[in-house]
Amino acid sequence: MTTISTFRDDALGNDDAVELSTKLQRGKVSARELTLAAIERLELANPTLNATACLQLERALDQALQLEARRAELTQFAGIPSFLKDNLDLQGLPTRHGSSGTSQIIKDQSSAFTEQLAGTGLVFLGKTRLPEFGLTATTEFSRDQPTRNPWSTQHTTGGSSGGSAAMVAAGVVPIAHANDGGGSIRIPASCCGLVGLKPSRGRTALNEMAQKLPINIVSDGVVTRTVRDTAATMAFLERQYKNPSLPPLGWLQNPPAKRLKIGYFTSKVTGGSAHPDCVDAVELTAKKCEALGHHVEPMAIPIQSQFADDFLLYWGMLAASLVHFGKLAVDRQFDSSRLEPLTYGLARHFRKNLLRFPFALNRLKRFTLDYKNVFSDYDVLLSPTLGMPPTLLGELNPRIEFEEVREKLIGFAAYTAAQNVAGAPGISLPMHQSAEGLPIGVHFSGPLGYEATLIELAIELEQAYPFQSLPVLRQAAA
């Protein structure tokens, strides 16, 4: 396997964002030094990883210099280099959504969540790649080179936040924006050995496109290498915007005070079980939780098989909306003739099953209550994040006809969509590796608003069983 790692002895080192922020505030490193180190690492890694959509390096350096002049005022993540995923607007750059059908129109204002995340002080070097409109679980394209996994450049980063995950896993930046409409934070976190929390619906500023949907399935967040970076991000975001209908989080830094009742399963919603490596990951994690004093027991999968068909039909509705109403939904220069074959396939699936859609939508809306009821018996659910380890690039490519790739995609992204429909939080943790040495995440989930329980459990697991990152290399492999 070819590995791409940029961790080395420079201003960024091996530190996470919290540690770098502390060094910045104490004057041990400058924002400009961090930005320059990130740019050098980007130039080293990105020609192979192909993880960025567009860059603003001069603007980032200017912002870093402005922060240096106000070093005494630095708080939160001010001065930490990062990236924004290319499906939110950032003033001064286009938003392409990973699609050849979108335009190069420069945005004159930033999205609400972009402003919220920028309010933590992060310095955006640019925007990261995603598959077309985030409609698949791999960051691949029919007309362009794929985004490659730093752990093995022959394998997928997952999707749809694959570009962000690649940049964080390779060490270019310690933290990057991601969002999740069916697993798009958690899937690439699993593939790239990262921590990926999907927040509850409404925890962060609403995604402008998603809030127009019949069911808002999208949540914005970040991918990180440490749990404390995720915990700090949620605390800093909460200072920018706090939803009064959800329990406050604050900065969580300790394991849970009480022992939890954890139910675990490895069966897929479509039937059968996950890949043996993914099953091993869950069973070993269950034993680790038990060793920490939690009550852990196996359970039947708490989701009916109908859910998979209903969610796929909802996904098809999203694709059909782009095919038929892209000029209204995206921009007036939108060219639907340049959409990916997978997007057209999903749209055809929706049209063929149009009369079933109202019933599917009604079941999905009722699912929120069904999901909530599961937690009358358990505090937390544990499952694989994915149905198999990271796939080889090409196996899920969007040029493959939808009918051929459909079952592969459903089998791969088999565990994460329930939380999107229910609006509930879920977190993927890098607890295991495959026989090939590829990262495998496990997935913890809870009811709406219970991020604190998931983060505290993640803190405890990370402290007891430290996660493995890519090794320190003096230069990236060619």
Image (tube, rainbow, N blue to C red):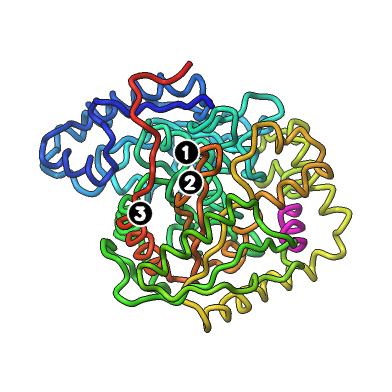
Give the structural element (helix, strand or loop) at label 2: strand
Q: Does residue 219 appear left or right of residue 249 in this picture?
A: right
Q: Which mark is residue 361?
A: none
Q: Does residue 185 appear left or right of residue 21 in this picture?
A: right
Which residue position is annotated with label 1?
164
Q: Gap in Å between the C-alphas at discs 2 and 3? A: 25 Å
Graded by Cα atoms within 10 Å as few (under 14), some (14 to 19) or many (20 or more), the crowding at tag 1 reads many
- Tag count: 3
Q: Residue at x 64, y 39 (%)?
A: 391
Give the structural element (helix, strand or loop) at label 3: loop
Graded by Cα atoms within 10 Å as few (under 14), some (14 to 19) or many (20 or more), the crowding at tag 3 reads few
Instruction: Pick the residue in front: 44 or 363.
Output: 44
Classify the position of the N terminus by image quarter: top right
Between circles 2 and 3, the one closer to the viewer is 3
Q: Residue at x 41, y 75 (%)?
A: 260
Q: Gap in Å between the C-alphas at discs 1 and 3? A: 25 Å
Q: Which mark is residue 178?
A: 2
Name the amino acid, label 2: Ala
With respect to residue 190, does 419 lie above or below?
below
Q: Gap in Å between the C-alphas at discs 2 and 1? A: 7 Å
Q: Quadrant of residue 39?
A: top left
| Residue 316 shown in magenta | yes
Name the amino acid, label 1: Ser
Look at the image and give the residue range highlighted in magenta: 308-318
Q: Residue at x 82, y 54 (%)?
A: 350
Main SS of residues in magenta: helix
Between circles 1 and 3, the one closer to the viewer is 3
Q: Position of residue 437 (x, y in %)?
A: 51, 38
Q: Does residue 285 appear left or right of residue 306 in this picture?
A: left
Which residue position is annotated with label 3?
465
| Residue 102 shown in magenta | no
